[in-house]
Image (spheres, helix red, strand yellow):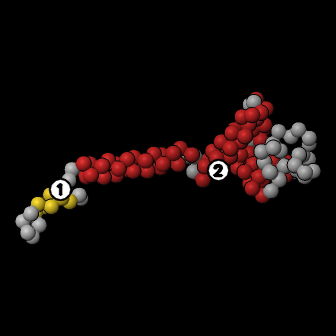
């Protein structure tokens, strides 16, 4: 229970937030807490989330809630792939950046020479 008002989860479920509510520490009574719980509830169900939180040690619950919110919001945006699509996109970015880095490193290791107007060799890095 946060400051006497219902937490975001109880607000969404339109029920009284009791002392010891499993959702209260993680879903603030503001619009964001309610929206986050809405997503988690639509994807996983309130009862399943409550069971999961009760089975999780208290010091790890915040990580569970963060993960559930992230996955739920991703699943709503992309019902087929969820957060896997984001992971795949990030992996492609890493692969592209690694290829660009390898290209630049290879270019730096192989200096290019050219003949200047005075016919003296000059050192140039391309």
Q: Quadrant of the C terminus?
A: bottom left
Q: Identify the residue shown where x is 83% and y is 44%.
A: 24
Q: Is residue 43 visible?
A: no
Residue at numbered disc 2: 73
From this view, report whether residue 107 is shown above or below residue 121.
Answer: above
**Viewer-nearest residue: 3 or 50:** 3
Q: Is 103 on the left-hand or right-hand side of 48?
A: left
Residue 70 picture location, percent across and down: 64, 47
Q: How many marks?
A: 2
Work out how far the residue at label 2 is from the one at label 1, CA to CA, in angstroms: 51 Å
Q: Identify the residue shown where x is 9% and y is 70%.
A: 117
**Viewer-nearest residue: 8 or 41:** 8
Residue at numbered disc 1: 112
Q: Identify the residue shown where x is 82% and y is 39%.
A: 22
Residue 47 picture location, percent across and down: 78, 38
Residue 125 picture location, percent across and down: 23, 58
């Amino acid at each position: 229970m946060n400051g006497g008002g219902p937490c975001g989860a109880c607000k969404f479920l339109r029920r009284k937030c009791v002392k010891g509510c499993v959702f209260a520490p993680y879903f603030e009574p503001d619009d964001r807490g309610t929206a986050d719980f809405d997503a988690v509830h639509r994807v996983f169900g309130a009862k399943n989330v409550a069971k999961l939180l009760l089975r999780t040690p208290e010091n790890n619950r915040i990580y569970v809630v963060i993960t559930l919110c992230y996955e739920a919001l991703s699943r709503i945006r992309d019902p087929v792939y969820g957060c896997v699509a984001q992971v795949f996109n990030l992996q492609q970015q890493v692969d592209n950046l690694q290829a660009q880095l390898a290209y630049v490193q290879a270019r730096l290791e192989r200096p290019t020479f050219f003949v200047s107007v005075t016919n003296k060799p000059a050192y140039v890095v391309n």
